[in-house]
Image (cartoon, helix red, strand yellow):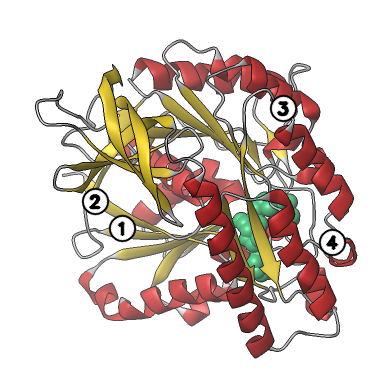
Amino acid sequence: MRKTFYIETFGCQMNVHDSEKVAGTLVGSGYRAVESAEEAELVLYNTCSIREKAAQKVFSRLRNFRKEQAKGKLFGVLGCVGQQEGEKIFDAAPHVSLVVGSASYGRLPELLRRLEQGERRVTGLDLDTDETFETEFTQRGNPFRAYITIIEGCDKHCAYCVVPFTRGPERSRTSESVVAEARRIADAGYTEIQLLGQNVNSYRDPAARVTFAELLAAVAEVPGIRRVRFTTSHPRDFTREIVEAMESHPALCNHVHLPVQSGSSEVLRRMARDYTREQYLERIGWMRAAKRPISITTDIIVGFPGETPADFEQTVTLLDEVGYDLVFSFQYSPRPNTPSLAMEDVVPEAEKNLRLRVLQERQKQIQLGRYQDFVGNVEEVLVEGHARENQWKGRTEQNIVLNFTVAEGGAAVQAGDYWKARVTHAGPNSLVGEAEGGPVARAAIRGAAGSPFAILQ
Ligand code: SAM
Ligand code: SF4
């Protein structure tokens, strides 16, 4: 009988994809995935500690399961909380047997063997590595979008961020292995790829002189790949060559997520972001001057220590100046080990909360205006499934949700298809439209219909 496992994932796409690779590693080590923690013999939490709330969620999950220990289940904490708390997790949650940071996932088969041989507690917490986590199997959970990690860790050390402490130093994969994975993904029927890293722009092939822009071009040329996305870009390392690659390769989606964090150069300096408002706007200018329109989205932190009302106002005016299609905004959350923990002039919680609401309200209006500009356009949509009866949900090349209907008697729609739809209405978060003609390209993916997992070797 194969042992069973269940993984719950918290946090970003990097974590989602790490879980896909961990699941593949477990399957390769003789385990079988089940649908709930209750059914599983091994329960893993792949965790996020970017903000305090995210880290707390994990401990509340672990508390829920204390009683289960008696039933012979094994528990593991993977990822950023695992790396940050280390062996202290065993004190807080004595029923945990495995604590592994993302820089040690390559050691998982060995750590699992030690658990199976009866060791009560095992850890993988070494950060001092130049290796990336490459797996023989990846158990992909998203039937339409295949993730590929191209760079792990981060060397930037922004003053508020735990990532360099939880994911370790920056290390890139070879372009050869990235392109080979893209080919395997295309052969399995995927048409959309998303390249991942904390700062994809600082990608450097360790074996050849291949820049990020050149890697983008190489992946865009893989036969069968219709859409290539990438995240996250860092303004300091974002180059004109990336925009040029997007201009000359239609498979590179016309969307860039370029986190700004603040519109005030003074706050950016204290955040150690390594660019000014003006330098950020210069990058925006490159994209706005591109041969095809590029959709721009961002991340913003409000209430960083010392952020004055005038600094905050500069962030609000930046929203107007750039015209983002989506903004992920957060209240500053003090994190262990980070330099901003020791900074003075802490912004009170109530003020942070107020600034967040002001920012989100302004962005909602901007977004509605931007989405209304799509009305009348014909956009290509990758269909993900039903929005409601008789209406299909998909995403445009800019990653905007577009729900569309097909006229009576039109061709049948399948998830994974590409359709053209004319936009008829716009809300602040999505577009509505009507199909034009039949499918542009048909779903090719194995397992998209019934199985939640497409398994790739
Ligand atoms: N590497 C990316 C970058 O440079 O922007 C993203 C890193 S992080 C996973 C995603 C977002 O979380 C950041 O862009 C930032 O807006 C937010 N974030 C990171 N640390 C934070 C903190 N201490 N408090 C609030 N938000 C934070
Ligand atoms: Fe964190 Fe800055 Fe690295 Fe992004 S670039 S992961 S915000 S340290």
| Amino acid type at mark 3 | Ile
Residue 19: image location, x then y, percent: 43, 47
Q: Residues within 10 Å of mark 1 (few under 14, many from 20)?
A: many
Distance Cα–Cα, label 1 vs label 2: 6 Å
Q: Nearer the viewer, residue 268 or 363?
A: 363
Quadrant in the rendering for residue 32: top left
Whereabouts is ligand 2, in terms of quadrant? bottom right
Q: What residue sits right under mark 4 in the picture?
A: 268
Q: What residue sits right under mark 2 in the picture?
A: 4
| Amino acid type at mark 4 | Leu
Q: Are marks 1 and 2 in contact (CB under 8 Å)?
A: yes
Q: What residue sits right under mark 1 in the picture?
A: 42
Lower position in the chain sequence, tag 3 or tag 2: 2
Quadrant in the rendering for residue 157: bottom right
| Amino acid type at mark 1 | Leu
Q: Are marks 3 and 2 in contact (CB under 8 Å)?
A: no
